Image: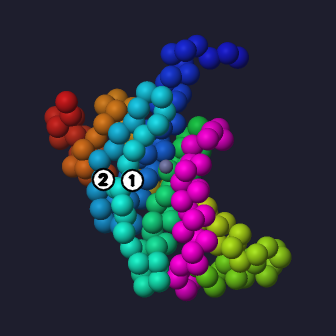
């Protein structure tokens, strides 16, 4: 079935909204930081705070939170659309770049990745990469209702301030709508 232009546009928008909502909710929950989110009609979007700075070798939990937050965009998009789009490609490149620098990761993550690596004969790198994906998927499942709320608000308004994201997180719809221009 061929999609009409409008259906196609709507689909792009939905994918982008869920992708950015995944990042935004993960950022709030895992890093305690709210963030403004924007989506564009072409399906691109932005929710990353730019220049996230953390110490790769001193803050294993923060490094891990950033990795999971970065993969949560694709995980949310995929859970909604079940379509493997290009969405997430830049995120994956960033994750691979961080992992290639051999950061300190939480002990529990490394322990279970070592176990997988032994069991499946994969390299440790691949197992850690897999652990990131699993954690992102778990996160998205656990926070799905919230992600849907943020994504729906995004589809409707295309841009949310950090305060509005916080409202959506706490399910305060009226304030969210009132604050939207
Ligand atoms: Zn992304």
Q: Residue at x 60, y 64 (%)?
A: 96
Instruction: Inspect the magenta stretch and tell me whether residue 89 lies in it.
Output: yes
What residue sits 21% from the left and 49% below the top?
Answer: 163
- Compared to 46, does 102 lie above or below? below
Residue 68 versus residue 172: which sits nearer the camera? 68
What residue is disc 1 on? Answer: 48
Give the position of the C terminus as an image quadrant.
top left
Ligand 1 within 8 A of label 1's CB?
yes
Other-residue count near label 2 (Cα within 10 Å), few / some / many at <14 / 14–19 / ≥20: many
**Could you tell whether 128 is left or right of 120 in the image?**
left
Q: Mark 2 touching mark 1, by CB under 8 A?
A: yes
Position of 31 with respect to 133 (left or right) is left
Q: Residue at x 58, y 13 (%)?
A: 4
Query: Of residues 160 and 143, which is closer to you in this image?
Result: 160
Q: Which residues are magenta?
A: 82-108
Q: Nearer the viewer, mark 2 or mark 1?
A: 1
Quarter of the rendering containing residue 158: top left
Give the SS element for disc 1. Answer: loop
| Residue 5, position as x, y percentages in the image | 55, 15
Q: Quadrant of the N terminus?
A: top right
Residue 35's disc number: 2
- Residue at image position (51%, 65%) is 67
The quadrant where residue 20 appears: top left
Q: Is residue 88 inside the magenta stretch?
A: yes
Determine whether 122 is above or below 49 in the image.
below
């Amino acid at each position: 079935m061929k999609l009409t232009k409008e259906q196609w546009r709507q689909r792009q928008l939905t994918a982008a909204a869920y992708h950015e909502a995944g990042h935004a909710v993960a950022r709030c929950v895992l890093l305690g930081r709210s963030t403004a989110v924007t989506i564009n009609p072409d399906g691109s979007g932005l929710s990353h705070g730019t220049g996230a700075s953390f110490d790769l070798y001193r803050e294993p939990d923060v490094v891990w939170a950033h990795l999971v937050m970065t993969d949560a965009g694709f995980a949310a998009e995929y859970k909604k659309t079940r379509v493997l789009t290009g969405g997430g490609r830049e995120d994956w490149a960033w994750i691979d770049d961080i992992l290639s620098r051999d950061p300190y990761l939480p002990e529990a993550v490394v322990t279970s990745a070592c176990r997988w690596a032994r069991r499946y004969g994969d390299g440790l790198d691949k197992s850690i990469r897999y652990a990131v994906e699993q954690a992102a998927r778990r996160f998205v499942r656990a926070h799905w209702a919230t992600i849907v709320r943020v994504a729906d608000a995004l589809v409707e308004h295309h841009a949310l301030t950090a305060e509005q994201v916080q409202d959506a997180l706490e399910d305060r719809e009226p304030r969210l709508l009132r604050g939207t221009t």
